[in-house]
Each structure stands twice: as C-alpha cells, then as structure tokens.
Amino acid sequence: MSKKHRILTGHRATGPRHIGHLVGTLHQYVAFQEEYECYFLVADLHALTTGFDRPQELNTNTLEVTADFLACGIDPKKATLVLQSAIPEHARLCLLLSMLVGVARLERNPTYKDQLHELKLQPSLGFLSYPVLQAADILLYQGEFVPVGEDQLPHLELAREVARRFNQLYGQTFPEPQAILSKIPRLPGIDNRTMHTSYGNAIYLKDTPEETRRKVMAMYTDPTRIHASDPGHVEGNPLFAYLDAFDPDPVKVAEYKKTYQAGKVGDVELKIHLAEVLNTALAEIRERRASLIADRRGLIEILRQGTESARPMAGETYANAALKMGLLTLN
Ligand code: TRP
C-alpha cells in the first residue's frame, strides 16, 4: 500500500465551535481522515497569545473545542488529535525556528497588522511569533498539506519560507507544506458580518434548539424589503446562505428562492423553516457533544491518547532539527 500523505491542521482553543466552523472546516476534516494521515491540533498555546489573562476560560475552551471536533465526526481511531501544549517540542522547535525568521518579516505579516489594529493591544513577543509557532506545529509532523482558510495563507507562506531556509542551511529536513484552501464560501454571521466567536453573531454547535430558533428569528435578511410582498434579494442574504449549506432538499431551496424574489413568501415563514432545518441537521452532533462534555475525564483521556501517539514523531523531528543546528546531544 502506498504511503498516505500527511495533513496537519488545527484550531485555536478560543471557545465552542460554530456552524461556520462546521461548514468551513470540520466537515472537510472528517472527509480527510478517510484518505490522509491526519493530525488535528487543539492549539491552546496559540490561544494564549491573546487570552493569557483568562486562564479559566482557556481551560474550558480547550475541552469545548475537543468535544466539538469529536462530535462532528473526527474519529480518534482514524486521526490523531493533539493537545499542543502537552508536547513540549512545539515550543522547542518554535524557539529553534525563531532564529531563522527576521523580526521585520513578522511585523509585515498582514494577519499580525490586522489583529493589532482590531485588538488594540500591546503586541507581546508571543503574539509576534504566532506564525513561527504555527510553522513549528506543521513541520514537527512533517505536514505536507495544511487545510486552512484564506486568512491563514500568510502563515502558511511563512512556514514554507522557514522550511526552505532550514533546508538550505542544514540540508533537506522538512517538506514545504502546501495549503489546501477550502472552496466552500464562508458562512456569514446572523448579522451578515463574518461569523466570529468574538462578534456575538454565531450559532454554536452547542446552542439548544430554542437558542438556535431565537437567533434565527433575529437574523438579518434583506434590508430593502419592508413587506413580505416586496420582492426579496437572495444574493448576500444569510438566510439563503444557511439554507444552501444545511437544507437537505435543494429543490425546495430553489423554490423558496423564486418565491422570495417574487415577494410571495415572508421572512418569518422562511426563518421558521430554517430553524427547523438547522435543528434537524445539528441534532446528532449536539447529542454527542453533550455526552462528551458530561464526561470530562473521558474527554481528557481521548485527548491524552491522541497526544501520546503523536509524541514519538514530535520527539524525533525535534531531535533531528536540534542535531542539524549543532546542539550537542549528551547521550
Ligand atoms: N492559526 C490557526 C487559526 O487561527 C490555528 C493553527 C494553529 C493552525 N496551528 C496550526 C492551523 C497549524 C494550521 C496548522 O485558525
């Protein structure tokens, strides 16, 4: 059997996952684990770069992300689930790689500049070197493919540069990782901005059917439409973005689009339908997630086992990199 290609990707442990994550990434991860050797990282160190002042939150969020990964179908028998901070080689390789990256290069990173602008924080050293840690995550497992959103491309580019530089200086060591860009359009939030954990506009996998219904009923639709009999816009209307993503009956969605454009169906009727569609689509995930969260020890055990199985490879890659850089081995 030919060797499977390796994928590495991850989420920062910033809180429960929402339906945008499900459609944009988690569904793909579940498909990837059938064909690739997959490492899925719960990036708690990366979450620290902005959340270091809320330790209790980070602790909970780490388990929330893990539970959502599993509930969506990431299968510990098929893929390796890794807790970043539990493998010291992530931080150790990050330190080694940081010798090869210029400060000015990191300051030019568009993601860094955007976040700095948005979060209005004094950038810490850890925040600046965020992409170096991400490069370490990928290279530690010799990741060949990295499924990411478009916003992560600058980080991938840096990881590629670091790999190339390392290989030039010390001989071929790391494959240059390639991005796999999701072709699925990003799901808007209920206010039609990007769905984001910190914008208060997300529908979470953990939301109850009632919360989901309430959020759907409050959704932004078509601001030009005053009466149900006014012709409505389908483009740029999150109601239809959600129906396209979740309604199992595309013929019915096409029909709704026509009647909406003709001013023959009201927002309320559509919203009631959408809430039902979402609640049906999410029912199983919610059930699994609730039982995972209820068994904290069991959840930690799954994460522990995944992490343990990743440890030898991380150790080997790190030791090899350290050796090539000239660090003395004492045994
Ligand atoms: N930076 C990524 C994000 O915010 C998360 C992440 C951490 C990651 N380490 C990674 C993604 C390694 C891909 C590969 O989404």
Image: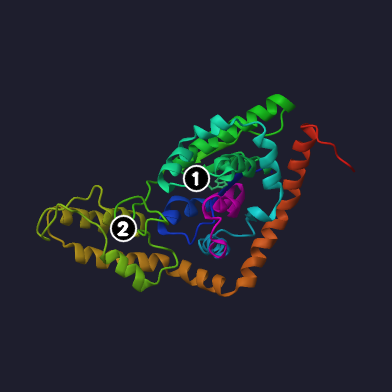
Q: Is label 1 in a helix, a strand or a loop?
A: loop
The kind of residue tagged 1 is Gln
As for residue 40 lying within the magenta part, the answer is yes
Residue drawn 68% across the image and 30% down it: 166
* Residue 307 higher or lower than 154, as above or below: below
Using residue 282 as the reference point, say whether residue 157 is left or right of it.
Answer: right
Question: Which of the image's four quarters has the C terminus?
Answer: top right
> Residue 32: where, in percent of width, then height?
55, 49
130 on left or right of 115: right
Residue 14: percent from the left, percent from the top? 51, 57
Q: Which residues are magenta?
A: 30-57
Q: Amino acid at mark 2?
A: Ile
Percent coordinates x, y for residue 302 in the rendering? 65, 64
Magenta stretch, overall SS: helix
| Residue designated by label 2 | 190
Residue 122 is tagged as 1
Residue that extends furthest to the front in the rendered view of this protein: 122
Q: Residue at x 10, y 60 (%)?
A: 227
Residue 285 seen: yes
